[in-house]
Amino acid sequence: MSEMCLACALGVGPCPVPHWTVSHKYDKRGAQLADGHYSRRTVGSPQFMPPGQTLVLVRDDAVFGWWRPHPDSGLRAMNGLDGWTCTIFRNVGPVLSSKLILAAERELAARHDCGPDGLLTYVDARKVASANPGYCFKAAGWRRSGRARKGDKPLLWKPFAAAGQLEAA
Ligand SMILES: [Zn+2]
């Protein structure tokens, strides 16, 4: 799925193109990046995703993790919503975060179906050093949802039909 990029093809960074490589939840680089992420529970743990079905995307300067309860398990998410949740996104490189989010949506949509509640993520307003927590998700077309809250973390949401696009399909 990844577009070819000269910086990555030649092994010289930083990469200016918002493309991802599919990896797994034990990815070493992903775990290192996750150690600096606010949602990380156990710093130094070799894996950084909750149990369930995951799609882990990495690049030299970023990590993105999609998660849902495994469809075969019969389990539901604790919030009762049926969709894919971004449980981690960290970008320390030069590419705009909103572009990496859109690319991550495309990688997900190319591989999986999605429940009716679409794409979801929680933003911890207390731990994000930003006047507008979740700004990069909003710039990628995500919106506040009043449907569920986790403590005082607002839920951001995007319909699956709009994955990879800025406007709702
Ligand atoms: Zn590249």
Image (cartoon, grey):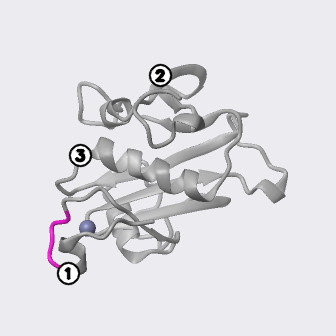
Distance, label 1 to label 2, CA atoms, is 39 Å
Specify the amino acid type for callout 3. Answer: Leu
- Residue with the mark numbered 3: 96
Q: Which of marks 1 and 2 is in front?
A: 1
Sequence-first tag of 1 and 2:
1
Q: What stretch is highlighted in magenta?
A: 11-15
Sequence-first tag of 2 and 3:
3
Q: For disc 1, does the CB lie below 8 Å from ligand 1?
A: no
Question: Which residue: 49% across, 36% down?
Answer: 122
Distance, label 2 to label 3, CA atoms, is 21 Å
Q: Mark 1 and 2 residues: CB-CB less than 8 Å, in contact?
A: no
Residue 13 lies in the magenta stretch: yes
Residue found at the very far bottom of the displayed protein: 10
Question: Which residue: 48% across, 51% down?
Answer: 106
Question: Which residue: 20% across, 65% down?
Answer: 15
Point out residue 26 in the picture as x, y percentages from the top left corner: 50, 74
In this view of the protein, can residue 63 be seen by the observer? yes
Does 167 sit above or below residue 31?
above
Specify the amino acid type for callout 2. Answer: Arg
